[in-house]
Image: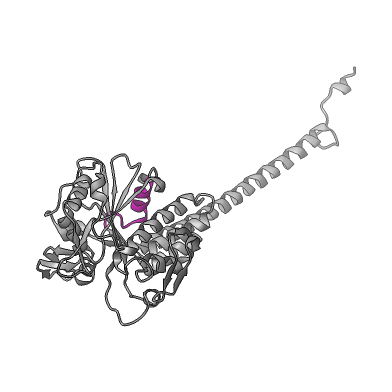
Amino acid sequence: MSHDAMAPAPHNGSGTAHHGGTRSNRGRKKDRKRRRGLKITLSVVLVLLLAAGGTFWWLYSSLDGNIKGVDINKALGDDRPEKLPTSGQNLLVLGSDSRAGAENKELGGGGSVSGARSDTAMVVHIPEGRQKAVAVSIPRDTLVTRPECTKADGSTTPSANRVMFNSVYSQIGPACVVKTVEKMSGVRIDHYLEINFAGFKDLVDAIGGVTVDVPQDIRDTSSGLDLTAGPHKLDGTQSLAYVRTRHGIGDGSDLGRIGLQQQFLLALLSEVKSQDLLGSPTNSYKIANSATKSLTTDSGLASLKSLAEFARSMNGVDPSTMETIMLPVAYDKQDPNRVVAAQPQAGDLWKAIRKDGTIPESAKKSPATGG
């Protein structure tokens, strides 16, 4: 091989060195394009993340802002029953018949009724372990001793005897309802939840209706509810009429409809539990929005985070094992249209809840049944 053959190729020719330089320039251009493309991609991702984060925050703030809070602890002070000796919890759930707003007024039947009453009241006891629950319904016509209470404006209302239970809400407010329940039961109420007519209707509609097995034909001319015995899927308006009917079942008193309310509660909880909320974010938001926009809670639950944490802690409770009981009552001797707590049954019931114990069968039987 000659010396010329061994010589390096000239840089200004058409040799390999020149071609190699061309590939290097092209490579640098490609690197610059890749870096520029990467910056653009990261910017787009960042914008999308910020947009998603902004949307999430808007949704969160929207739901969080729906919830109204009542500072029960501040209103009641220290004169209260002791907390449970276990990790059990007691929740007072009220369905308010407020006519505030056009939709509530229409759903409540319109008319000139002012203020609001506790249309439905339940003490829900969740024992230690939170694997089951007991719901005790307090008839709205029950005569109770209302304790001294402080109104929202700071004025004091003296104690009163033989006051109808559902009037406490309209006369004083939710904190006094909690205090009344605590005084009559000796049970410490840990949390408070209240939902009005419109919120109840919208919640049922958001989950697509609730199926109930109607125990007997119901024909209520007041509400327009007309159902035959057997299974029916009810929309929000029908569901509200179902849990509020008192003329279409039993003796026309509040006692007759408590069984319907308890049955509906279990059906509603089962329907919510069966919904694939994680699989349908849109549906989840609809349900959450409906559940929160007409909700009032104690200040300890008055945020989306607190409600979610409480709901998660209740996840082990199976609606099919939830027990529903009506507070044992007897017809009042002075006014047969009113009832009073029956003893010793009511005392035994509250004692079992105070101690987070088993409720004796005798404490579940009520002398007044509602016919």
Q: Position of residue 18 (x, y in %)?
A: 80, 36
Quarter assignment of residue 47: bottom right
From this viewpoint, is residue 274 visible?
yes
**Residue 59: horizontal and vertical position, in percent?**
45, 60
Q: Residue at x 54, y 50 (%)?
A: 279
Q: Quadrant of the C terminus?
A: bottom left
Task: Report the magenta stretch's main SS.
Answer: helix
Furthest residue toward bottom: 112
Q: Which residues are magenta?
A: 299-312
The image shows residue 234, relative to residue 102, as above or below, that is: above
Which is nearer the eye, 343 or 123?
343
Q: Nearer the viewer, residue 345 or 209?
A: 345
Give the farthest residue toward the right. 1
Residue shown at the point (22%, 53%) measured from the top left: 189
Instruction: Please indicate whether residue 338 sits to the left or right of residue 161 in the image.
Output: right
Taking the view exactly as shown, the residue that stands out farthest to the top is: 1
Can residue 51 be seen? no
